[in-house]
Amino acid sequence: MNDVSAADILLYLAIAVLVIWRVVFRQVRGYRLSARGLTLIPAILVVVGVVSSAKALPSASGTELALLGVDLAVLAALGVLRAASTTITAKDGYAFAQGTARTLVLWLVTIGVRIGFLVLGAHLGADGPLTSASLALTLGLSIGLQNALAYQRARRLGLRVATGRAAVASARD
């Protein structure tokens, strides 16, 4: 990664902490599905990722673009698998999702795959700014797809999804 600055490293660390704490830990512990909770983190990650990637796009090589395409496809597939591994039940009148041991393993695979793409990019000489700048974008899309599928499953099961913070806060365990 040729042009990684201290600010980039801090951004990547913040994203890692956000994903591990707010997403992975929460999924394993279980959480009430809410529109806000399903959209906020993926939206933030996608916006940050689009902005970062857009800056890096003009100097991206064809190999970097191809690597990004494969990365997006693989992480989307992992998002689908994580969604399928999550149990969704009713709790206090709302949809409640909880990851399983398989969900945790799939998260570890997701993180490993993303690191693997960074290493592969360096090995192929495609370690320009786009390869690292797209981190938030790829994770945001993967989490967003997982959340969209969880929402669809809850709706198919006839379960209510909380719409706002008040509904979630009043029903915490």
Image (cartoon, grey):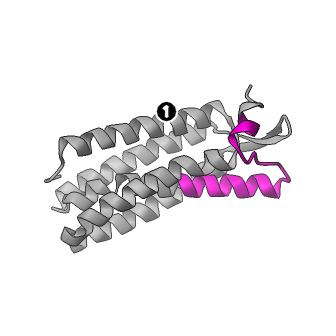
Residue 73 position (above or below residue 19): below
- The x and y percentages for residue 28 are 60, 33
Quadrant (top left/top right/bottom left/bottom right) for the C terminus: top right
Q: Which residue occupies 46% across, 36% down?
A: 20
Q: In the image shown, does 90 or 50 lie closer to the viewer?
A: 50
| Secondary structure mainly formed by the magenta segment | helix
| Residue 171 relative to residue 57: left or right | right
In the displayed structure, 106 sits above or below 153; it is: above
Q: Residue 62's x, y, as percent?
A: 23, 74
Residue assigned mark 1 = 21
Relative depth, front residue between 164 and 129: 164
Q: Going 39% across and 52% down the picture, which residue do you hit? A: 136
Examine the structure image and report whether residue 163 is included in the region drawn in magenta. Answer: yes
Residue 67 image offset from top left, x and y in percent? 31, 65
Q: Is residue 108 left or right of residue 91?
A: left
- At a point 31% along the width and 58% down the height, the residue shown is 52
Residue located 22% across and 69% down the image: 60
Question: As drawn, is 63 to the left or to the right of 31?
Answer: left
Depth order, front residue of 16/127: 16
- Let me know if residue 57 is in the magenta part: no
State the extent of the magenta-drawn residues as a range.
143-168
